[in-house]
Amino acid sequence: MRVPILTGAALLFAVSSCADVQDDSQSSDNAALGDALPGTNGATFAAAKANFLAQETADDGLGPIFNERSCALCHQTGAVGGAGENIERRYGTLTNGVFDPLANTGGSLRQLFGLGTFTVNGGQNCQSGTDANPAPGATIFAGRVTTPLFGLGLVDSLPDSAFDTLASREPAAIRGIVNRVTTALPNPLDPSQTTGGTRVGRFGWKAGVPNLGQFSADAYVNEMGITTSSCIRGVPNLAFATENRANRAPTNAIINGCPDDQNPGTDDDLVAETNNCAGGVNELQDDVANFTFFMAHLAPPVPLAIVAGTSQDRGRMLFNSAALQCSSCHRTDSDVFRSTSAGGIQAGIVFAPYSDFLVHDMGTAGDGIGNAGDSVAVTHRMRTAPLWGLRSRNKLFHDGGTTDRAAAILRHNGGAAGQGTAAANAFNALTQAQKTDLVNFLGTL
Ligand code: HEC
Ligand code: HEC
């Protein structure tokens, strides 16, 4: 059952730029948060957005364990697709000095809710179980706040070389790492992507995910418990076709002796629908395709204009200064941040995300979560948080631990090994008036 919900979206209207040209997003100067990119088919965008808003039930495949019933219930601050108040829980432990996500107990992501009692096979009563808290064996715990999705189609469209270029421009001491990852689910529209191939990870707090389609299928199963299959150039893709297990459940598919949910098997099974992808079918499962379309076509947030000589203007100069080096990681290179048509969006849109989408060793400021086998140093890596749209955000830093922008800057201090430590210290050494200026500049983004 697909029930559109009311969003209460506060529309933030951009102030048209006047004295200043700091807004690089040339083609969306008057866009409101949540609008579509120029050139987007309005009806398709509306349908895709409705799917992003749709609250799912057990009949749709929700669960057996899940965190929310729709994408939009988490991504909603400012407009549909925004950041959120929800802070997810991750856990793991170190075994022989390397990270162990405790995948055999459903880690590293916790699911907070379960369907409870449900019936299968005409009467067998089942229990979904819920994730135990703390998970057995877990020693490392981290929160992850929900990130905003505006403008991410532009980022998705960038070739890998864009990120190599950004890294090459960064000072050696704080240079980010291009996080090349394996593509589990390629974008069918982009011939350069293949199942099992490599692409630069750019999405999520760890830049661990290479494209928006894969993030959609991943979120659908991990946040909502809805499994999907897709067809990539005639080959079944089952990367997201298996339910999460609740902690202590004996196998992925069996919970307290029952099949995984009301519809054993894959909830939304495009492979079965298309007869094993016969005929070379090349498409994402339809919900996944809709989420992807919606996100890919969300316009970037538009910054407020800055008047020369104001506190915000002084703050911008501090942000860009060699002393603070904020802009070495939070980047706006207008020659690199230029969309391509690879994922089906308009090419040539220049944007200013205030990020490099690279991971940095943040020392003890990192969250300590990684993939199986990661060294401790790798678990300290975090993606430079994009600062566009910051004024419509609330909870900051990966754990949402503060709403105070100055406090978020001070949290860059991760000790001797942290690449953010120098910036935090330089900020700390500013006069109170300078600190206010910098924070006021952030308030224009
Ligand atoms: C329970 C809350 C929740 C739900 C439901 C949810 N998300 Fe998210 N989303 C998050 C959090 C938290 C993050 C940050 C995750 C991380 O990196 O650890 C995130 C990150 C993302 C990102 C990466 C954004 C970036 O900054 O790179 C995408 C894309 C995304 N979500 C899409 C979706 C889609 C599509 C759905 C629905 C299928 C969805 N999400 C459902 C909480 C949620
Ligand atoms: C070495 C690269 C680097 C430098 C230099 C740097 N940052 Fe960051 N910044 C990051 C990373 C990485 C994060 C995400 C950290 C996390 O949440 O774990 C971040 C997060 C932030 C956030 C929180 C954003 C959010 O969405 O929660 C703000 C605000 C911020 N930085 C501002 C600044 C300012 C201002 C400066 C200069 C004083 C600066 N940063 C310098 C890498 C950097």
Image (spheres, rainbow, N blue to C red):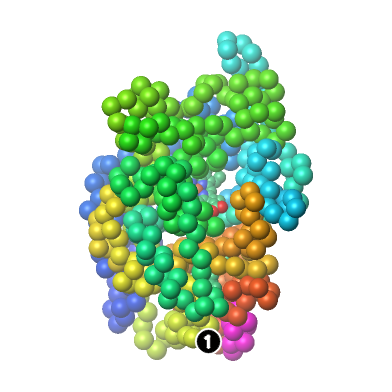
* Amino acid type shown at disc 1: Ala
Q: Can residue 385 be seen in this view?
A: no
Q: Where is residue 413 in the image (x, y as percent from the top left)?
A: 64, 74
Q: If the image is split into quadrants, where does the N terminus sit?
A: top left
Question: Which residues fall within the magenta stretch?
Answer: 424-432
Q: Mark 1: is the Cβ under 8 angstroms from ligand 2?
A: no
Q: Where is residue 200 in the image (x, y as percent from the top left)?
A: 44, 57
Above-or-below relation of 84 to 257: below
Q: Residue 91 lies in magenta, yes or no? A: no
Q: Mark 1 points at which residue?
A: 323
156 relative to 425 in the view: left or right: left
Above-or-below relation of 325 to 114: below
Dot 1: element: loop
The residue lying furthest to the top in this view is 122
The foreground one among 187 and 396 is 187
Above-or-below relation of 418 to 117: below
The residue sitting at 39% across, 89% down in the picture is 309
Classified by dominant secondary structure, the portion drawn in magenta counts as helix
Q: Is residue 137 visible?
A: yes
Count numbered badges in the picture: 1
Q: Where is residue 76 in the image (x, y as percent from the top left)?
A: 47, 51
The residue sitting at 49% across, 86% down in the picture is 322
The residue sitting at 50% across, 59% down in the picture is 179
The foreground one among 79 and 227 is 227
Q: Where is residue 436 in the image (x, y as percent from the top left)?
A: 54, 82
267 relative to 422 in the view: left or right: left
Which quarter is ligand 2 in? Answer: bottom right
